[in-house]
Amino acid sequence: MSLEQQISKGIMEAMKAKEPVRLQTLRNIKKYIIEAKTAGTEIAELPDADVVKIIAKLAKQGSDSAEIYRQQNRADLAEEELAQVAVMQEFLPRQLSPEELTEAVRAVIAEVGATSVKEMGKVMGVASKRLAGQADGKDISAKVRELLG
C-alpha cells in the first residue's frame, strides 16, 4: 500500500475513532498531496518519495511554529502543533542518529570522491536525495562541511 493510500485510510480511521487532531493533520497532508498531483501534468498517484518530502516539510513547519509559540508563551498552541507533528512522524522514515548521519555522509563523500569543501555541491546533491526524509538538509550540510573542512 502506497503512502498516499495509507494517509487516505488513516483519514477514514480517524473519522471513525473521532480523533480531531489526527483527522485535521491527515486531511492537511492529503490537501498538499492533491495540490502536488494537479500541479503541471496531472498524475494518478504521487510517488512515496514525493509524499515523504511533503510530510517532512509540513512536520518541519509545525516544529518551527511550535518553537515560536513557546517563545511567545503560548504553550496551548505549541502543544497543538506538536500533536500534529507527532501524527506526521508516523508516516516519515526513522530519523538518522548523529552517528548514522556521519557514516552516511562519509559514504557519499567516498562515493563521489570529494576532497574539499569546493566539491560540496556534488556531495550535497547525492546526500540530499539519498537521505531525504531521514535527516534535515541543514544537518546534512553541516556534516558535509565538518567532514570536508
Image: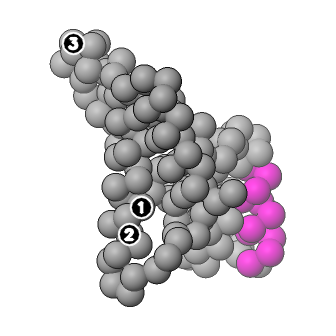
Q: Residue at x 43, y 32 (%)?
A: 15
Q: Secondary structure at mark 3?
A: loop
Q: Amino acid at mark 2?
A: Ala
Q: What residue type is disc 1 on?
A: Ile
Q: Which residue is mark 3?
A: 73
The kind of secondary structure the magenta stretch mainly shows is: helix
Q: Quadrant of residue 39?
A: bottom left
Q: CA distance from mark 2 to mark 3?
A: 35 Å
Task: Please provide percent x and percent y for residue 102.
Answer: 73, 49
Q: Is residue 105 left or right of residue 75?
A: right
Secondary element at tag 2: helix
103 drawn magenta: yes
Residue on which the image places disc 2? 36
Going 71% across and 73% down the picture, which residue do you hit? 115
Residue 59 coordinates in the image, percent (x, y): 44, 42
Question: What range of the chain is rendered magenta?
Answer: 102-112
Q: Residues within 10 Å of mark 2 (few under 14, many from 20)?
A: some
Disc 3 marks a residue whose amino acid type is Asn
Residue at image position (42%, 23%) is 18
Q: Residues within 10 Å of mark 1 (few under 14, many from 20)?
A: some
From the viewer's side, name the closer residue of 53 and 46: 46
* Mark 3–mark 1 distance (CA, rounded to whole Å): 33 Å
Q: Quadrant of residue 62?
A: top left
